[in-house]
Image (cartoon, coloured by chain):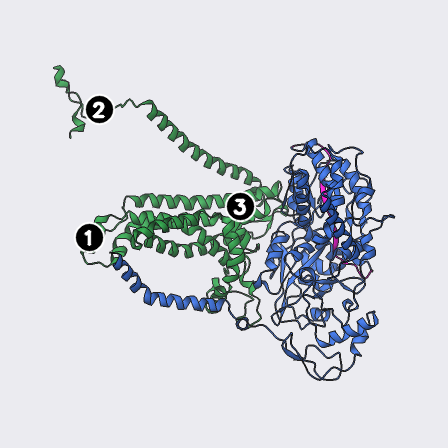
């Protein structure tokens, strides 16, 4: 087709003017419906952007009073006593990150396995069932996960936590002070209400999201390459590891980051499970941890004036972190759609 | 179970009311044009408030109450997002616990007592796999437990309080409130009055001073949970063995858990029953200064030291904070509803309090509360029902609290000494805990004379040299011919995790076995099934 050569020939008018090498600008007179649609989409896009900006601005403005009062100590103080100007996010941020890390390190293998099974291995009739089951998991409200974590998981996971502390206690993060494996009467309480339990609960909440993103990415691996791999004698695992996983790598990273973003902000389930402490607690199996969102949930009711400003500052920190994580995630997920990451 | 006379009367009356289908008498006074009202605050009083709310529902009074802690309630009242607040302590204008000062507009609010009760210590403790239901502790031990001073159940001080129990070498896990709470505040006020040294040494490093501490400072080894319900449900978990938390008595009853019998100034270990609370609060000083900022607030100094043997020292009143001006969302129509609701629970509602685990208000407070209700905008002026029609179980002709008359004297085995009662407490009234022989012998000698005689236990007749106790599955009695043999000579029986049958490790083993089996057989089965499908 010669789409670019449809410009009218100047020679047809019989003049000798030089031919303009630039292609003609095409002005399509779009229909009214098109214009409304375009305007509408543009407007919603801008609206989303401005709402996000407004939330950030609001948090920043409300947080100014508290941030100005303590300055950089805000990042290094573990206590939370805003009205005597001793407060900071060192403890809550540590807890938030630890809970999110536990959640992600449990949910990623789970989600990857589930996604691979659904997209590659499960027979077609089972696939639909599994997809809707996973979606159902995502639809369960977080307070239900919180109740389940509090009433069931917390008691059931003590054995695993104790085992980890006994055999891997030499790794600092698994050490539990006050737990003596040789003492049969040692209280199991020291293994409850920890970042580990909270992380496991959150893992189950973020796994479905991660699973759907990954499944989407895996199913986009081109059929030609899959069959090529089989033709070269690859087993199913060989095909998955050489075609599906490289194609889906962007989706895996994006899904992981999306899950991380949600895990960082999870409030009510964490709030119900943990016992809040205001000290930097690195030991994930030990009782007591904290998170930014559960701090806000706990204290916003009692806070006034300056206390509220301090909570806004904590919220701002969480907002910024979540925003960074989600932007990274969406950038990676977008890049992967073209298959640019593929090594094939 | 034997019913006390007044409770029997109450039962008869309520069944009569139900049979006749009579509406509550107090309700007939107001026109039923009620609008929904909402309130927030104390979780301590929440069980009573929720009971009243469901009771007035049939009179088309709609009340929405969210129990988020007393501090939360006061704050929301200040922000005018609720119509009333429930709080165990007044507004804190000069707080010492690091929270922000609360400055309500003068003259815009009034305090009204709603119900009394005991802040009880609910615990989860087992000896030889058997739940302890008759634990008793002195105030000093409780103060030390909740400040990190006593960390093991076999501490000498706890043993001294419980001569009949062989305390296990289990860690004490104090469960404290993480949110701003009136229970924490009352507990801290008690501790400052009774054990100022323990409080000040605990507090000095944590930036709190003398005064109500709504936010209990967290300390190493403690678990913090929000709300009475959060504390109670944590203590009640099977894995929480060794845990002890402070909640209102009703929460322990609802969770079917025992509460600590606390040592009072008369030397008796007493349970926070409604009757004992009623006795204790006879000594509560109620502020009579008509300044609305303090009027009707409580000073419990003399309750802590009251020497009646039936006193539960940690007794207190809980309050409503009522609006006295129309502002924000609060209208006269809401005021009328709030007045009707308040009138109901000051009279009729108090009947239900003892069954829930609260203690009804005495006559003088109900009288004062009626005057407070009249200050609510929209409340019917002068139309309050005469006190005589107020169906409150505490009323007597001369105004003293009837419950204090009928409160039974504590048993001799509850006196500080070698004896120890076996009867369960709180939500475990029907489950007794056996005591060792020395204490049992002291119980018998004490019960025989009807008075507590600390020396009676030691001089009791010679015990059999060795006897088998089927309850604890051990041989007891050192056979030294003294009834008061050292209970600690006998080996302390313990419950091993493996001894309780199926447990987490067995489950893990089973899962591991199943996974191994699935790994071996799984691929074959799956591929066979897939092949069959094709």
Where's the N terminus of chain B, which quadrant?
A: bottom right
Residue toward you, A327 or B396: B396
Q: Which residue is mark 2?
A: A24
Q: Which residues are magenta?
A: B308-328
Task: Answer whether residue A90 is visible to the viewer in this image.
Answer: no
Q: Earlier in the sequence, mark 3 or mark 1?
A: 1
Residue A108 percent location from the top left of the image = 39, 54
Q: Residue furthest top?
A: A14
Q: Is residue A83 left or right of residue B17?
A: left
Q: Earlier in the sequence, mark 2 or mark 1?
A: 2
Label 1 chain ID: A
Label the green chain with its letter: A
Q: Residue at x 73, y 44 (%)?
A: B20
Residue B196 bears which disc, if any?
none
Residue toward you, B230 or B32: B32
Q: Are marks 2 and 3 in contact (CB under 8 Å)?
A: no
Neighbours of disc 1 within 10 Å: few (<14), some (14-19), many (20+)? few
Label 3 chain ID: A
Residue A230 percent location from the top left of the image = 21, 55
Instruction: Give the SS element for disc 1.
Output: helix
Q: Is residue B51 above or below residue A241?
A: above
Q: Which residue is mark 3?
A: A314
The CA span between labels 2 and 1 is: 44 Å
């Amino acid at each position: 087709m010669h789409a670019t050569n449809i410009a009218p020939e100047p020679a047809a008018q019989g003049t000798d003017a030089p031919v303009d090498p630039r292609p003609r600008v095409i002005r399509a007179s779009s229909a009214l419906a098109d214009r409304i649609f375009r305007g509408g989409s543009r407007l919603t896009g801008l609206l989303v952007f401005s709402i996000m900006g407004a939330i950030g601005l609001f948090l920043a403005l409300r947080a100014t009073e508290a941030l100005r009062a303590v300055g950089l100590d805000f990042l290094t103080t573990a206590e939370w006593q805003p009205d005597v100007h001793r407060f900071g996010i060192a403890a809550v941020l540590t807890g938030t990150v630890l809970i999110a890390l536990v959640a992600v390190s449990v949910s990623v293998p789970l989600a990857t396995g589930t996604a691979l099974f659904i997209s590659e291995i499960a027979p077609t009739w089972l696939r639909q069932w599994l997809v809707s089951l996973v979606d159902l998991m995502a639809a369960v409200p977080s307070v239900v996960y919180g109740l389940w974590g509090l009433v069931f998981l917390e008691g059931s996971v003590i054995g695993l936590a104790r085992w980890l502390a006994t055999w891997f206690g030499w790794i600092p993060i698994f050490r539990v002070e006050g737990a003596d494996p040789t003492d049969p009467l040692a209280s199991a309480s020291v293994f409850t209400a920890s970042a580990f339990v909270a992380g496991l609960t959150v893992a189950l909440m973020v796994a479905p999201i991660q699973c759907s993103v990954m499944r989407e990415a895996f199913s986009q691996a081109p059929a030609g390459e899959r069959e090529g791999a089989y033709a070269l004698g690859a087993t199913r695992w060989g095909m998955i590891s050489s075609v599906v996983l490289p194609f889906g790598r962007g989706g895996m990273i994006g899904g992981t980051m999306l899950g991380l973003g949600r895990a960082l902000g999870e409030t009510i389930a964490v709030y119900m499970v943990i016992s809040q402490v205001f000290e930097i607690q690195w030991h994930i199996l030990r009782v007591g941890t904290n998170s930014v969102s559960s701090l806000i949930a706990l204290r916003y009711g009692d806070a006034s004036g300056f206390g509220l400003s301090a909570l806004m500052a904590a919220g701002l920190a969480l907002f910024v972190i979540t925003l960074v994580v989600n932007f990274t995630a969406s950038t990676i997920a977008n890049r992967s759609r073209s298959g640019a990451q593929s090594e094939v | 179970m034997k019913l006390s006379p007044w409770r029997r009367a109450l039962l008869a009356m309520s069944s009569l009311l139900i049979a006749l289908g009579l509406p509550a008498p107090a309700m007939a006074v107001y026109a039923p044009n009620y609008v929904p009202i909402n309130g927030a605050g104390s979780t301590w009083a929440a069980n009573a408030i929720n009971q009243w709310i469901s009771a007035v529902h049939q009179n088309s009074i709609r009340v929405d109450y969210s129990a988020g802690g007393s501090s939360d309630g006061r704050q929301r009242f200040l922000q005018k997002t609720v119509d009333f607040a429930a709080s165990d302590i007044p507004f804190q204008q000069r707080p010492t616990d690091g929270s922000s000062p609360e400055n309500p507009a003068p003259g815009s609010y009034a305090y009204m007592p709603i119900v009394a009760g005991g802040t009880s210590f609910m615990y989860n403790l087992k000896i030889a796999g058997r739940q302890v239901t008759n634990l008793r502790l002195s105030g000093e031990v409780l103060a030390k437990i909740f400040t990190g001073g006593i960390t093991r159940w076999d501490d000498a001080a706890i043993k001294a309080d419980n001569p009949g129990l062989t305390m296990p070498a289990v860690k004490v896990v104090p469960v404290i409130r993480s949110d701003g709470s009136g229970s924490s505040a009352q507990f801290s006020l008690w501790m400052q009055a009774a054990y100022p040294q323990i409080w000040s040494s605990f507090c000095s490093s944590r930036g709190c001073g003398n005064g109500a501490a709504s936010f209990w400072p967290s300390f190493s080894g403690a678990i913090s949970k929000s709300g009475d319900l959060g504390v109670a449900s944590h203590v009640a978990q099977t894995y929480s063995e060794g845990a002890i938390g402070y909640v209102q008595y009703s929460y322990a009853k609802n969770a079917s858990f025992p509460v600590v019998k606390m040592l009072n100034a008369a030397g008796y270990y007493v349970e926070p029953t409604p009757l004992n609370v009623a006795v204790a609060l006879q000594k509560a000083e109620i502020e009579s200064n008509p300044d609305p900022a303090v009027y009707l607030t409580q000073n419990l100094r003399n309750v802590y030291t009251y020497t009646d043997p039936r006193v539960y020292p940690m007794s207190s009143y809980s309050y409503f904070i009522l609006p006295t001006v129309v502002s924000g969302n609060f209208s006269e129509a809401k005021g009328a509803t709030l007045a009707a609701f308040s009138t109901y629970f000051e009279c009729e509602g108090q009947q239900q309090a003892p069954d829930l685990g609260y203690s009804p208000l005495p006559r003088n407070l109900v009288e004062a509360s009626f005057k407070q209700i009249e200050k609510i905008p929209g409340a019917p002026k002068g139309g309050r029902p005469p006190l005589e029609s107020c169906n409150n179980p505490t009323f007597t002709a001369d105004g003293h609290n009837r419950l204090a008359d009928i409160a039974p004297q504590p048993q001799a085995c509850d006196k500080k000494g070698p004896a120890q009662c076996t009867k369960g407490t709180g939500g475990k009234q029907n489950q007794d805990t056996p005591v060792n022989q020395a204490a049992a012998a002291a119980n018998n000698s004490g019960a025989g004379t009807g008075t507590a005689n600390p020396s009676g236990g030691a001089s009791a007749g010679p015990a059999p040299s060795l006897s088998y106790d089927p309850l604890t599955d051990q041989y007891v009695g050192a056979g030294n011919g003294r009834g008061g043999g050292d209970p600690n000579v006998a080996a302390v029986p313990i419950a091993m995790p493996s001894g309780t049958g199926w447990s987490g490790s067995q489950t893990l083993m089973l899962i591991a076995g199943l996974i191994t089996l699935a790994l071996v057989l799984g691929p074959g089965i799956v591929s066979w099934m897939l092949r069959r499908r094709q």
